Amino acid sequence: MKKILITGGCGFIGSHTIREILKNKEIELLINLDALTYSGNPTNLQDLKDERYRFIHGSINDYELVMSIIKERNIQVILNLAAESHVDRSIDSAVAFIETNIKGTMVLLECIKNRKSVGHEVHLIHVSTDEVYGSLGPEDPEFTEKTPLDPKNPYSASKASSDFLVNSFVNTFQISAIITRCSNNYGPNQFPEKLIPLMTIRALNGESLPVYGDGMQIRDWIHVTDHAKGIITAMEGLIKGIISPGEVINFGASNEVRNIEIVKQIIKLTNSSEEQISYVEDRPGHDRRYAMGYEKAKKALGWEPEIGWDDGLRQTIGWYEENSDWIDKILNGTYQ
Ligand code: NAD
């Protein structure tokens, strides 16, 4: 598979996935279709100089545009990472989540279906999240690919809807698509509304560190590079027939950490003070715990996370410390 369309490539995970894909010299063309919403940040890729890479500013909701890219560039695989991705924003308003996460995915599926009808097969890797499985109790076993979907907030409900749509197109039209679901990512280039960059930047600036509720919410944190490698491994698994259309692959890191522990680790690594912690009203409907089982990715694809939490967190915080330009451009609005 030499001609790939990635959507949402200017975002956090998309930009890391682009860098990983281009390490493969056999790739001839990688098109990044990104609408540059608030979280789309072209500076994430500004140092990228590779003639096989092309950026197109546009939306996955634009059927004519997506269709023309697939057709004219003879695209063989789509990696769908374009999304509205922040739970808090979905609580403020779910409209953009329905538009991009559900309707946008639907546009990609329609394009794939219609190209298939003229003999052009386009594979789809639809990137989803552990949040579609809902919330775990303290003693519950971790999620597997067989865990029933039970989304609890508008963001995860929109992602679960798109997952159902993908599998409905596999079943009804026999398109070649799989779904990957990953736990919480951390690493460089994450938009500073998410926990780790938000707390790091505020800690470095000597500001208060707002912790939701009791801070005891647990997430299974994975480094973004491990996730990017997982997406690529899943793509190769689908193309080689190791995994079949309609299958789901979970990625996690067996790294369950409470939010408050993360904040305290960030405080240590940035030499700031626990007095900066300020407990604020909890997010409505806040899921308590996620934990991802990834036995299938290990057994079927030979994928395992490689970056340990302590090293990964230190490297990530170091990156935010060293890249104050990247932060300033976001804070003063000039990043786009
Ligand atoms: P992000 O918000 O950093 O990036 C999303 C990107 O999509 C941005 O570049 C944005 O401009 C683009 N985009 C939004 N709407 C678009 C549209 N209509 N057309 C084209 N581009 C559009 O998100 P992220 O954290 O990189 O997440 C990427 C994907 O991975 C999402 O599907 C998310 O659900 C999933 N995911 C994220 C995490 C995580 O911890 N961040 C974990 C598991 C899964």
Image (cartoon, rainbow, N blue to C red):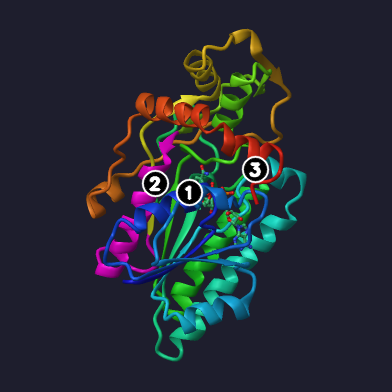
- Which x, y percent locates residue 35? 63, 62
- Which x, y percent locates residue 120? 40, 85
Between marks 2 and 1, how big is the CA–CA gap? 8 Å
Does label 2 point to a residue whose CB lies under 8 Å from ligand 1?
Answer: yes
Q: Going 49% across and 52% down the picture, which residue do you hit?
A: 45
- Which x, y percent locates residue 259? 54, 24
- Disc 3: which residue: 87
Q: Is residue 319 magenta?
A: no
Q: Going 68% across and 63% down the picture, which residue do you hit?
A: 99
- Disc 2: which residue: 227
Q: Going 29% across and 63% down the picture, which residue do you hit?
A: 236
Between marks 2 and 3, how big is the CA–CA gap? 20 Å
Helix, strand or loop status at disc 1? helix
Dominant secondary structure (helix, strand or loop) of the stretch shown in magenta: helix
In front: 231, or 284?
Answer: 231
The three-letter code of the residue at mark 2 reads His
Nearer the observer, disc 2 or disc 3?
Answer: 2
The three-letter code of the residue at mark 1 reads Ile
The three-letter code of the residue at mark 3 reads Val
Q: Are marks 2 and 1 in contact (CB under 8 Å)?
A: yes
